[in-house]
Image (spheres, grey):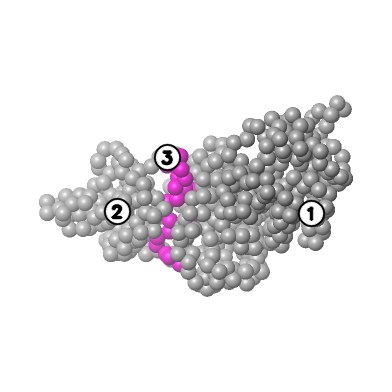
């Protein structure tokens, strides 16, 4: 293999001899950037998880990379091109001489637009997070289903491999590594029947396999998934939630809890409800992914980076995250009620990222459930006949059913609905008691003018409420609220703080956030 590596270095020197060419090395490839073009050459290396030791193997790997990645990112991946030695001894890309190497021919993109770079610049906005989730949903919908037996059976060895890698170099406390490994194996034993059943249900697929933020890039303001695993089909044939978990975990690592929660909720809303019954796997999945990233960082702790505190710090943060995620907090149920225009949905979405366990609560919205019930798009307006007491009972029954499924998996839920009837609120209290979780009931209140103003400013929302509906609701007999009544007439930030105060203090039945004159 030394001869192969020496031959490659000659090719690499030739490619970088041209002005303006930049070379970037990873553990398995060298990428040459030249203007709008990028050439990716597999390095002549052999690792336990990949083998590029011969020219034929590197050619096959290039072809597989095109096959796997082009459907995800056709604007990036184009073809496999031969690097040839010409009769005069020169080296050319795509020449007519003898092939001496192969490369993936790609379009170069703006490296500063990968999500890891964007996350360092501040909070990722909701539109971007939703679009990233949509891209992941689309990739999973197109992915080929596989027998899940091999995937489930591989997890104990994967956990043990993580422990071995984290012990290497003595960078982490050995007891901490041991405890993480033990907790991970115990978590796997608990959920193994669930994972086996999901394999039978078609949730194990040939996925991207490496969906951390550096492998998602904005092109024309749309998230594009790239650099999917091509060298080991088995490594990428996993439960779809394990694939998603890499993105969720990395968003948490980059201090983007709101984006992580949006991605989770968007994904769950767009995929089969069976995923609600697998949320108990997320702590293990995210923890394993964090441990993998810690290992990747440790692998860079070699010359010339062996003394780089930034790389070690990154490894330590990933390791700390892995240890935290494997021990999820107990779940809770939060119900957000209030008449139309009080800001329930905005509040529920703002609360969700901060509700343990990570990446935050699953938000269950009555407006969305109703639209699903009638088989229409979220923003398609329904007729008044869709709002009969009978339909309302079905909506709240479905919300309770979904919340029960989420809570049963050890995950928190937020139910967002009007809850204008006392029996609807009592049913939520009964649900919390049945599931053995604490309940925080929050009922938002605001004057009619404020509610109508907010309703009038809505665009592209799932709610069908109009200003006329808001006026009619003034005559509702709400009865005894029994929950924390939250003054929602102020700013979104003020209302959110009032709710956090109510949750922290466990207040029920008083108007929270109002001053002596009734204002916030």
Q: Quadrant of residue 498?
A: top right
Element at label 1: helix
Q: Identify the residue at image location x=87%, y=40%.
A: 510
Density class for disc 2 (Cα within 10 Å; few <14, some 14-19, many ≥20) is some
Q: Nearer the viewer, residue 208 or 406?
A: 406
Density class for disc 3 (Cα within 10 Å; few <14, some 14-19, many ≥20) is few
Instruction: First in sequence, mark 1 or 3: give its number.
Output: 3
The residues colored magenta run 209-234
Q: Which mark is residue 428?
A: 1
Q: Quadrant of residue 54?
A: bottom left
Q: Nearer the viewer, residue 509 or 36?
A: 509
Q: Is residue 85 magenta?
A: no
Q: Nearer the viewer, residue 482 or 55?
A: 482
Q: x, y percentage for residue 272?
A: 58, 60
Q: Identify the residue at image location x=20%, y=54%.
A: 84
Q: x, y percentage for residue 484?
A: 83, 43
Decide if residue 401 is on the left or right side of residue 506: left
Q: Is residue 327 above or below residue 514?
A: below
Return the residue at label 3.
220
One can see residue 260 in this view: no
Decide if residue 257 is on the left or right side of residue 220: right
Element at label 2: strand
Q: Quadrant of residue 466?
A: top right
């Amino acid at each position: 293999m030394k001869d192969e590596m020496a031959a490659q270095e000659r090719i690499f020197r030739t490619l970088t001899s041209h002005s303006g060419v930049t070379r970037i090395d990873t553990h398995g490839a060298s990428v040459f950037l030249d203007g709008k073009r990028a050439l990716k050459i597999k390095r002549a290396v052999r690792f336990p998880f990949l083998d590029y030791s011969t020219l034929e193997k590197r050619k096959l790997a290039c072809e597989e990379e095109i096959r796997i990645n082009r459907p995800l990112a056709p604007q990036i991946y184009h073809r496999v091109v031969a690097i040839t030695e010409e009769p005069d001894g020169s080296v050319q890309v795509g020449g007519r001489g003898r092939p001496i190497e192969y490369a993936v021919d790609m379009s170069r993109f703006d490296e500063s637009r990968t999500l890891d770079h964007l996350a360092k610049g501040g909070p990722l906005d909701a539109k971007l997070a939703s679009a990233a989730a949509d891209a992941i949903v689309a990739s999973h919908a197109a992915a080929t289903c596989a027998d899940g037996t091999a995937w489930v059976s591989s997890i104990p060895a994967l956990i043990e491999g993580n422990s071995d890698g984290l012990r290497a170099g003595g960078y982490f406390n050995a007891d901490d590594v041991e405890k993480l490994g033990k907790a991970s194996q115990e978590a796997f034993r608990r959920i193994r029947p669930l994972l086996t059943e999901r394999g039978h249900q078609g949730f194990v697929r040939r996925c991207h396999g490496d969906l951390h933020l550096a492998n998602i890039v904005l092109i024309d303001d749309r998230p594009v998934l790239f650099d999917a695993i091509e060298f080991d089909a088995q490594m990428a044939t996993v439960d779809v939630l394990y694939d998603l978990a890499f993105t969720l975990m990395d968003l948490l690592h980059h201090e983007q809890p709101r984006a992580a929660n949006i991605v989770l909720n968007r994904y769950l809303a767009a995929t089969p409800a069976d995923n609600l019954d697998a949320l108990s796997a997320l702590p293990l999945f995210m923890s394993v992914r964090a441990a993998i990233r810690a290992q990747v960082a440790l692998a860079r702790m070699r010359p010339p980076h062996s003394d780089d505190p930034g790389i070690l710090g990154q490894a330590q943060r990933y390791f700390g995250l892995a240890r935290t995620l494997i021990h999820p907090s107990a779940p809770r149920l939060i119900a957000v009620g209030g008449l139309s225009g009080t800001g329930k949905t905005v509040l529920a979405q703002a609360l969700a990222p901060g509700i343990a366990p990570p990446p935050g609560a699953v938000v269950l919205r009555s407006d969305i459930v109703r639209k699903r019930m009638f088989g229409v798009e979220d923003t398609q307006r329904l007729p008044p006949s869709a709002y009969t007491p009978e339909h309302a009972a079905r909506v709240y029954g479905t919300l309770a059913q979904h919340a029960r499924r989420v809570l049963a998996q050890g995950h928190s839920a937020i139910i967002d609905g009007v809850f204008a009837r006392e029996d609807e609120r009592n049913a939520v209290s009964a649900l919390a008691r049945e599931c053995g979780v604490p309940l925080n009931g929050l009922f938002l209140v605001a004057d009619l003018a404020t509610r109508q103003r907010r309703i009038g400013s809505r665009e592209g929302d799932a709610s069908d409420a109009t200003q006329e509906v808001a006026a009619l609701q003034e005559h509702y007999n709400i009865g005894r609220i029994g929950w924390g009544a939250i003054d929602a007439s102020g700013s979104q930030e003020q209302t959110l703080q009032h709710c956090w105060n109510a949750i922290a203090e466990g207040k029920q039945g008083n108007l929270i956030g109002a001053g002596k004159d009734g204002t916030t």
